[in-house]
């Protein structure tokens, strides 16, 4: 019905059914979006006056604002659709009118803040997908040009709260802060750095817990602004004020709130609050450190002989360990970026020391199956120092933070796709994982890259932390019997496997010999089939990740292959599959070593495998047999190359 919109006013005035009124508003909104410019002027003006009056009437009624939130929001949406059509050409005074009416009452002011926020979203967030680019540019320019009026209203509300907090509606202040947080993404920089906005936010709206999250969102938007070098220099003093104020607030946070999941540390009713605060704080600190660490934070520490930058990095490291997925992902992305910057700086130092000679970077972020010697030995060619204290002054200064991050990464390492055996922490059962968790695989890849970067920034530190963790597990696991939780060992082994190729070869050899020996001993000590399966899966994953080591140490390679044959006889679900797949991976990457004739042995190892294959294959199913024979075929193919 093309004229259905003409009945909307009657329906809204007479109907008592919320659903009916909502449908009527939907019809009106559709008309505004699709037929507005073909309607006669009188009808357009009539709709505009009707919707505007309805918004004012509803906003003036505090009870209606509370009980009919969805209805009020839908009416607001209709008004914004009209504004997009009329403003600025046919309704140039819209911004002025809405700002002036905001001083009529707190209830109207609160709704006006919602309207301004919705307009900003429609123009800056969704505009390009719903309007032609010229129209979007025009609205952006107009909103920016008239923003002084909007900013004055926002500051009027905030300053009124500072002067007389008891007289201000809490919801109005919250809505103003939300509105301001959205505006800060695009407003001219002068409103941010040439006013007292920063001080107003951090000195008056951080302490009240009901405003802290919204205050922190505003500060996060300021910290996230992408400034040019010239702008950073111009606003250096204001950025310094922001940083020092923020550091002071963060250091004053009660330490026990980081353990918000513990009811003994934080009351249960405050758990969601602290979870939200720390998630937002992680965004804020990482944004500022990404954008201004080198230009603002570090120079300030030198000038003041302070440790603010290190302290805030320690805070981010502590938040990385929180049991909150979103916070962890934010921090993980930051640590990858942070470690990458530090390592690039180290490369530049080494390059200068080598008189500008090009060097191959040591990052083993991907290891192709046919990895050539040059790729495998890239780290040795670069000859990076193995201790963080020898790399650069920044790496030395942040060594404590980097160690803290290494420990968190090991503790939270995601499961790689190659591992089938999993431990369910809720039920305490060990099972075979039949489906690939794509989200966890993606997380593993990001964490793996971060671990490789961190290892390059301190090989000896990484080795010491991992061996210490492994020794602790090897001592505790056998005596805990049925109460052993293998999660820590699993994640440690995933971490060990993830850094393959990131250490210098002599360090890798020393490290891996200790790791595999400890794991093999632990496997012998474990009594239950479940526990043995867990340790076996970790051994298989680790050895499959280090072909360079296995190729260089024949006796170790031979021991590993025999151990894989032993695991092929394990009937626990998933162990045989993983043993066969690991055997195939080892055979593909170490085929020359396994096919070689050795003077100390009566016959090639491949012949020994072929002669005894029946013993291994008789316990395998058809798919596992295919994997076994494919592995043997790879080794046989190498005999022609020798």
Image (spheres, rainbow, N blue to C red):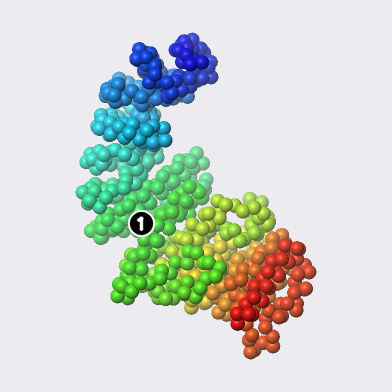
Residue 223 in percent (x, y) is at 33, 47
Residue 516 figure quarter: bottom right
Is 27 left or right of 207, judged from the image as shown?
right
Q: Quick check: 234 above or below 372?
A: above
Residue 634 figure quarter: bottom right
For the residue pair 434 and 165, the one nearer the viewer reads as 434
**Is the residue marked by circle 1 packed among few (<14), some (14-19), or many (20+) residues within 10 Å?**
some
Residue 243 in percent (x, y) is at 29, 49
Q: Residue at x 62, y 82 (%)?
A: 596
- Asked whether the viewer can see residue 147, the reply is no
Residue 563 in percent (x, y) is at 67, 73
Is 581 left or right of 148, judged from the image as shown?
right
Residue with the mark numbered 1 = 311
Q: How many callouts does the rendering have?
A: 1
Q: Residue at x 32, y 76 (%)?
A: 354
Is 486 left or right of 455, judged from the image as shown?
right
Q: Quick check: 401 above or below 274?
A: below
Residue 618 figure quarter: bottom right
Q: Pick the quarter of the image with the C terminus.
A: bottom right
Q: Residue at x 50, y 48 (%)?
A: 324
SS class, disc 1 = helix
- Asked whether the viewer can see residue 634, the reply is yes
């Amino acid at each position: 019905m093309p004229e259905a919109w003409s009945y909307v006013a009657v329906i809204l005035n007479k109907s008592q059914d919320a659903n009916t009124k909502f449908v009527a508003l939907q019809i009106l909104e559709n008309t505004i979006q699709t037929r507005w410019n073909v309607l006669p002027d009188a009808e357009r003006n009539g709709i505009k006056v009707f919707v505007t009056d309805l918004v004012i009437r509803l906003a003036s009624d505090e009870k209606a604002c509370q009980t009919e939130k969805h209805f009020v929001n839908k009416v607001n949406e209709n008004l914004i659709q009209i504004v997009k059509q009329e403003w600025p050409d046919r309704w140039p005074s819209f911004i002025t009118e809405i700002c002036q009416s905001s001083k009529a009452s707190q209830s109207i002011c609160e709704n006006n803040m919602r309207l301004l926020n919705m307009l900003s979203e429609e123009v800056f967030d969704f505009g390009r997908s719903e309007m032609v680019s010229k129209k979007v540019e025009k609205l952006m320019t107009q909103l920016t040009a008239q923003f002084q009026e909007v900013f004055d209203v926002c500051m009027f509300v905030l300053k009124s709260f500072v002067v007389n907090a008891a007289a201000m509606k809490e919801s109005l202040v919250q809505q103003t802060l939300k509105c301001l947080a959205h505006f800060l993404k695009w407003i001219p920089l002068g409103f941010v750095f040439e006013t007292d906005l920063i001080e107003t936010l951090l000195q008056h709206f951080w302490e009240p817990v009901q405003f802290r999250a919204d205050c922190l969102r505003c500060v996060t938007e300021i910290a996230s602004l992408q400034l040019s070098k010239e702008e950073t220099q111009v606003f250096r003093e204001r950025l310094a004020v922001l940083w020092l104020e923020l550091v002071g607030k963060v250091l004053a946070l009660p330490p026990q709130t980081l353990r918000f999941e513990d009811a003994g540390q934080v009351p249960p009713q405050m758990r969601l609050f602290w979870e939200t605060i720390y998630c937002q704080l992680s965004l804020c600190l990482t944004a500022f450190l990404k954008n201004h660490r080198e230009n603002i934070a570090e120079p300030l520490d030198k000038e003041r002989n302070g440790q603010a930058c290190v302290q805030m990095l320690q805070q981010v490291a502590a938040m990385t360990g929180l049991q909150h997925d979103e916070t962890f992902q934010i921090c993980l992305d930051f640590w990858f970026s942070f470690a990458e910057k530090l390592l690039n700086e180290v490369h530049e130092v080494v390059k200068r020391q080598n008189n500008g000679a090009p060097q191959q970077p040591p990052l083993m972020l991907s290891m192709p199956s046919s990895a050539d010697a040059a790729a495998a030995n890239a780290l040795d060619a670069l000859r990076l120092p193995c201790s963080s204290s020898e790399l650069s002054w920044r790496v030395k200064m942040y060594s404590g933070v980097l160690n803290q991050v290494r420990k968190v990464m090991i503790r939270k390492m995601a499961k790689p796709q190659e591992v089938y055996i999993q431990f369910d922490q809720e039920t305490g059962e060990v099972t075979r994982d039949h489906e690939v968790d794509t989200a966890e695989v993606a997380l593993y890849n990001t964490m793996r890259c971060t671990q490789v970067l961190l290892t390059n920034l301190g090989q000896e530190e990484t080795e010491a932390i991992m061996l210490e963790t492994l020794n602790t597990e090897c001592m505790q696991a056998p005596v805990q019997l049925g109460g052993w939780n293998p999660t820590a060992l699993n994640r440690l082994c995933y971490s060990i496997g993830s850094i393959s190729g990131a250490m210098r070869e002599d360090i890798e050899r020393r490290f891996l010999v200790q790791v595999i020996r400890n794991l093999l001993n632990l496997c012998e000590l474990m009594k239950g089939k479940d526990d043995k399966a867990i340790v076996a899966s970790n051994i298989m994953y680790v050895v499959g990740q280090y072909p360079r080591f296995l190729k260089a140490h024949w006796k170790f390679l031979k021991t590993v292959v025999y151990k894989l044959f032993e695991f092929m006889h394990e009937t626990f679900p998933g162990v045989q599959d993983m043993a066969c797949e690991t055997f195939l991976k080892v055979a593909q990457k170490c085929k020359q070593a396994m096919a070689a004739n050795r003077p100390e042995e009566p016959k090639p190892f491949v012949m020994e495998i072929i002669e005894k294959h029946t013993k291994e294959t008789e316990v395998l199913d058809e798919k596992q047999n295919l994997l076994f024979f494919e592995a043997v075929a790879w080794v046989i193919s190498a005999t022609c190359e020798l």
